[in-house]
Structures are given as C-alpha cells and as structure tokens.
Image: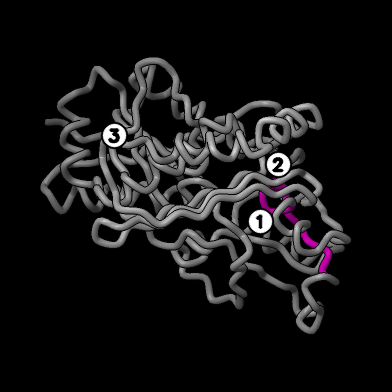
Amino acid sequence: MKSIRIGTRNSALALWQAREVARHLQNNNYLTEIVPIVSSGDKNLSQPLYALGITGVFTRDLDTALLNDEVDIAVHSLKDVPTKLPENLELISYLERDYPQDVLIRKESAKTKEFHELKLATSSLRRRAFWLKHYPEAQFSDIRGNIQTRLQKLAEGDFDATILSLAGIKRMKMDIDYEMLPMMIPAAAQGVITVAGHSDKKEINEIVRNVTNHAQTQICVEMERNFLSTLEGGCTAPIGAFAEKFDNQIRFIGALCSLDGKNYIATDENFEYDPNENYGKKFAKAVLENGGKELMSEIKTQL
C-alpha cells in the first residue's frame, strides 16, 4: 500500500493532531504523508464563528479534499465537526480522549480580580452563556485564532482573560498558568481527535479504525453528539455535553443555556450502559420537553 495521505488544517495544534494519527499508523508499519490545507475558519479571523452563518467552518475544506481524492483521511478536533456529515464521508475513528475541560487564562494585570470582575475575550456562545449564568454582569470581547494568536491578543487587548480548551494547552506543552472552570460543561466531544474518511475507501478506513479507534471514547462522544444533534444545536449554540464511562457505568451531563445565561436547562444522569439505547437522543428529548424546545427557538431567532 502507498502512503496514507493525512489531511489536516495547518495550525500548530492541528498538525500535532495529524502527527498523532500518523504515529499510531507508523507504529503499525503503515507509511503516512501529512497534507496541510488552509481552512476557511483559519482564513477569516475577523468575525466570530456564529456570525459566519455556517457549521463546519473548520472542516469543509478538508471535506472537499476528501471528496476530491486529494487526501485519504482527514484529522479533526471532533468538537469542530458538524453532527451531519457530507454525503459519502464518515467518521471512522476516535482517538482516546485526553483533556475535555475548559480553563481560564488571565493576563498578569488581572491576577487578583474576582471572576465577576473579569472582562472576558471569547467568541464561543457556549462559554459566554455558561459564564453569564453565574456572572450576569460580565463583559465580553470577540477573539479568534489559534492558541498562540489568542494568547498574543490577550496580552495586547483591552480585556482581562480568555477561556481555552485544556487539551490544546497540554498538547502544545505550553507553560502557562490556568484555572479550572467546573461550571463550564464542555462542548460535545471536546478533547477528542477524530479521523474522517471517504465511504468508498473501505480498506484504508478499516486500517485506520483498527489502529486508532478507542472504543470507550467512541461510546461517550457518540452520546454527546446525539444529544447535540437532537437539540439541533450545530457547533455554535450554547450547549454542553459530557459523558464519562467507568466499567459499564456512565455519567452524562448535558445542558442548554439561553444566550444571556438566564434560562438554563440541564440533565445529570448516572446509569448502566446498554449499547442498544440511544441515550444522547433520550436525554435531549427530556431537555426539549422541559422547555428546551421554546428555548432553542428563541436562540435561533436571536442568532
């Protein structure tokens, strides 16, 4: 077999993720070639994601490369991947999850400020809404770009702190201070690298699945993404979802929040796992029946 061509965004973090997939394949004696592709989401850093009016802003260029046979597989941060994929594309593996949490990074001048005093830089509607639930007077600035760009903007900008994914900080081995944010439910599938493939490339897909897929992670993230898709949230609505599996027990936490943080509908479940049950859909339906349907309509109108 020729080298497996691995498509990726060309940011430092995305390239790290692609190299991680390549490492698994190389350790099993498969040749690999990394093919960087500039995504639309990386080209437009002036607008927050929700203002671009589309989902899949970080994945569609890689989707196109897959469909045009420019690459054999594409590596994504799973939280960026829409719950509905283009025809003929599929998610073929999920690497073991490492760090799902959101963390707070402060600039030096804001080290002594209380949470409610902080002016935050984040373009994530989820992070804004969940923060407003606890600190309703909070002020925000938009911020986009890779981790290094955001940290530079934090140092230079007129705000006190930003919120980042812990996974990115750890993967980049960045030596920076951060604070855990237990009130922040992660985005569905946060902290998970996924591999997408073309449905026709069955041999390559099977190789990648056998070498890189982590079954326990797959169970959890599929539950989270089913929760998200049933709420019809896309990638930008203020929805959090996190499942954790211990032996055959799962704890699932999911929440939908209004943009201003005032209306918050959550579910927190502990249960024995049954592979025949679609738990994500079941818990999302419970949220919808508990006022979530009206709240989703309100959010879509506001967006």
Quadrant location, the C terminus:
top right
Residue at 80% of width from left, 64% of height from top?
Answer: 135
Q: Where 195 sits versus 99, above or below?
A: above
The circle drawn on residue 261 is none
Do residues under tags 1 and 2 come within 8 Å of each other at their CB atoms?
yes
Residue 221 occupies quadrant: top left
**111 left or right, relative to 250:** right
Residue 298 position, x and y percent, is: 77, 31
User: Nearest the camera: 158 or 161?
Assistant: 161
In the displayed structure image, the side of residue 293 where residue 277 appears, left or right: left
Secondary structure state at the residue bearing disc 3: strand
Residue at point 37% right, 35% down?
278
Q: Specify the segment rendered in magenta.
A: 118-128
Please identify, in this view, whether the residue under mark 3 or under mark 1 is nearer the observer.
Answer: 3
Question: Residue at coordinates 42% horizontally, 53% vertically from top-left?
Answer: 243
Identify the mark at residue 92; answer none if there is no mark.
3
